[in-house]
Amino acid sequence: MGNRCINNYKGGAFLWLASLCALNSEAAFHLENIEDIVSRENPRSVSDFMKSEKIPAFLRKNFLALKESTSVQAASVDCPRILIHNEDSSMVMSFNCGTLYADEEEEHSASSLEIVQLNRENGEYEAFSLHLTSQEAVISDKNPELCLQCHAEDERPLTTPGKFWMTEKEKELFVKKLETWPESSEAKLRYKSLNWKQSTSLESIKHAVQKTWIRPWSKL
């Protein structure tokens, strides 16, 4: 299962969600902020973490919704994988609905926030995982084995462009469907923590790629 991400990367189909041209953005949220929420608020689920008032408003609208995923954090049109990112992509964290998994590793990831963050001292990205259960919240050591299944050869944030992203219409239909879910369901609470009305659009992503991201859109 570990090769499914790496093989796709070798095929050259990934867009790197990482800009090294805009590293001084004031709008930033990093691992230390995540650690602070864990230590002060003691969250016991992804939705519990996401309801924290310490998460800035800009972060709740800076996200991609994926309907397919090659990572251990699965995705579908009814259980999108959410990639939340800083303005400068110096940190990306992700989650899915929490109920879509086919094996033990995917189940573990479904109960976690997966995190990739730029180390500004050496210019390299590092992977972490915040695993949340009813008993505890545990932040992994740097680059845990589960993360390296996808990020062993390139530690940067990765996502397949275009076809894996939910369209604006798909997002609109998903939000409508979301309203019919039980109010207290973990999945609904996760997704409702986001600002869907102002979420990152495909057009704005294209613009950002042309302006600052590493690989030009035209070459994907």
Image (cartoon, rainbow, N blue to C red):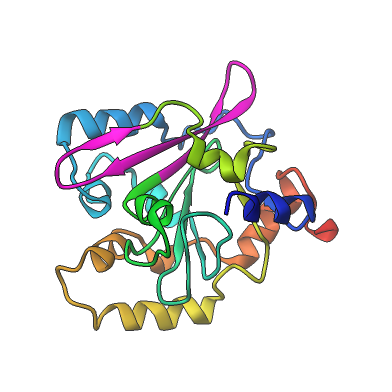
Q: Residue at x 63, y 34 (%)?
A: 22
**Position of residue 67 measured from the top left corner of the image (x, y, whole percent):** 52, 70
Question: Dividing the image into 4 quarters, which one contains the C terminus?
Answer: bottom right
Instruction: Please provide percent x and percent y for residue 57.
Output: 34, 49
Left or right of residue 96: residue 215: right
Location of the N terminus (image quadrant): bottom right
Query: Against 207, is 37 above or below?
Result: above
Residue 105 image offset from top left, x and y in percent: 42, 51
Q: Quadrant of residue 24?
A: top right
Nearer-the-camera pick, 7 or 117: 7
**Residue at the right extreme, as displayed:** 219
User: Can residue 89 be seen from the camera position used here?
Assistant: no
The image quadrant of residue 78 is: bottom left
In the picture, measured across the screen, residue 154 lies left or right of residue 120, that is: right
Q: Is residue 139 left or right of residue 181?
A: right
Residue 56 position in % (x across, y down): 34, 43
Bounds of the magenta span?
114-139
89 or 148: which is nearer to us?
A: 148
